Every structure is written in C-alpha cells, then in structure tokens.
Amino acid sequence: MSMEVDHLVVAANTLEEGRAWCERVLGVAPQPGGRHALMGTHNLLLNISAPPTYPRCYLEIIAIDPEAPDPGRPRWFDLDQPAVRERLAHEGTALLHWVARVPSLDATLATWSGEGIDAGEAVEAARGDLSWRIALRQDGRRLRKEGLPVPIEWQGDAHPTDKLPDSGVRLVSFEARDGLSAELETPNGIVELQAIEATLSNAPTTF
C-alpha cells in the first residue's frame, strides 16, 4: 500500500511550551498554524521536508486549545489520556505520533479492516484553506503503539508545506516498526526524537 510520511505529531502541554521547546531543541521558531474546531486543539507548524525521501513533510506541534469548547468526543492522538496528559505536564513536549499521506483513505481503511485493524472512520476536517479526510477512532487512540500511523488524504492540491518557509530543519530518518523515532538535521545539529509510548495509557494497546 502506498503511503508517505506526511507529518510528525509533537504534543505539548500548552502551545507556548511547544514553541519554546522547538526554539530550544531544534534551534528554530515554528510557524503559526491554526485551530481544529472538530477536536478542540490548535497547532504550530515547521517544514521538515527532505526530498526525494521525505517530500512535503512537516512537524506539527499540537496542544489542547484552552479557549475551545469541549469537542464532545475524545481528542485525537491520545491527547485526553490521563497518563499522556501527566507526561506532558511533568516532563514536557514530546513526539507523540505520526500521520501518513495516502492516495485513498477509503481503500486504506478497507485494507486495514480486512487485516483486523480498527483505524476508525473517515472524517472530513478543515483549517483555513486546507481540507482533508482523516481516520479517527471513537476512542481517540493511537494504533499498535506507534507502529501504524493515522492515515490522511488531502483534498485538492493544497498542502501545509506549500506555505511554510524553509526552516533549516530536515527529516533525516524515520522508524516506526519497533517504537516511533525520528532523526532531524537542525541548526543545533542532529536531534533524535523518541515517542511517548502508547503503553503509557491505561487501556490495552489498540489494533
């Protein structure tokens, strides 16, 4: 099945903490993102494209938006899990998950369902002039620790990296099979990110 790394999800206790982490650890300031009305979250973005291996790739710093109403459902990427919230509050910003770009979300979900993997349902979402379809589980959980991504299908030709300036940060390597990790080339040198394990949560690992 064709899929590409679309973006890395870095979670923060607050967006300002995420901004400070990016400037301190990666040596650059992230760009403004926006709000996700569907999930009650907001974000900052950083272009980490490294073609031809990782084209149109970015880093998303995401946090619960304190000004947004409760979305009425669990937020994506385990952001509502108590153990994840505690980890972010006490140990700070960290890599949480990844999102893969696929040519057909419906085909991806059908294939995974046939393999016994419940990735959720296709949901339409938008932010500004961007629109996409993304798979969301009702419980907001990540899949198989960090082995499987959240699949996304962008609508039309628009992609966040189209308007993101060159940041001087590049995705050098990416591993998801035995725990999610990423290596970035930055103005501060090579930085390796290790994800918060899904087993931090208080429920069984989801498949």
Image: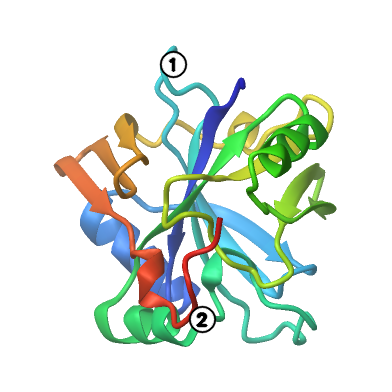
Q: Which mark is residue 88?
A: none
CA distance separating discs 2 and 1: 35 Å
| Residue that badge 2 annotates | 81
Residue name at image x 70 percent, y 65 percent: 35
Where 71 falls versus 98 (above or below)? below
| Residue 84 screen position, x and y as percent | 42, 78
Give the side of residue 136 with respect to residue 22, left or right.
right
Structural crowding at the residue carrying mark 2, measured as other residues with C-alpha within 10 Å and reported as few (<14), some (14–19) or many (≥20): many
Quadrant of residue 54 in the image?
Answer: top left
| Residue that lies at the very extreme toward the top in this rendered image | 52
Task: Check disc 1 and give the amino acid type.
Answer: Pro
Q: Are marks 2 and 1 in contact (CB under 8 Å)?
A: no
Residue name at image x 73 percent, y 64 percent: 36
| Residue that badge 1 annotates | 51
Task: Check disc 2 and give the amino acid type.
Answer: Gln
Quadrant of residue 145 in the image?
Answer: bottom left
Front-most of 96 and 148? 148
- The figure's colour scheme reads rainbow
Quadrant of residue 64 in the image?
Answer: bottom right
Structural crowding at the residue carrying mark 1, measured as other residues with C-alpha within 10 Å and reported as few (<14), some (14–19) or many (≥20): few
Which element carries disc 1, helix, strand or loop? loop
Question: Along the polypeptide, which appears first: circle 2 or circle 1?
Answer: 1
Report the quarter where the C terminus lies: bottom right
| Residue 10 screen position, x and y as percent | 43, 58
Report the quarter where the N terminus lies: top right
| Residue 52 screen position, x and y as percent | 44, 12
Q: How many marks?
A: 2
Where 72 falls versus 41 (above or below)? below
Give the side of residue 128 with respect to residue 108, left or right.
right
Residue name at image x 37 percent, y 70 percent: 199
Where 25 falls versus 80 (above or below)? above
Residue name at image x 68 percent, y 77 percent: 74
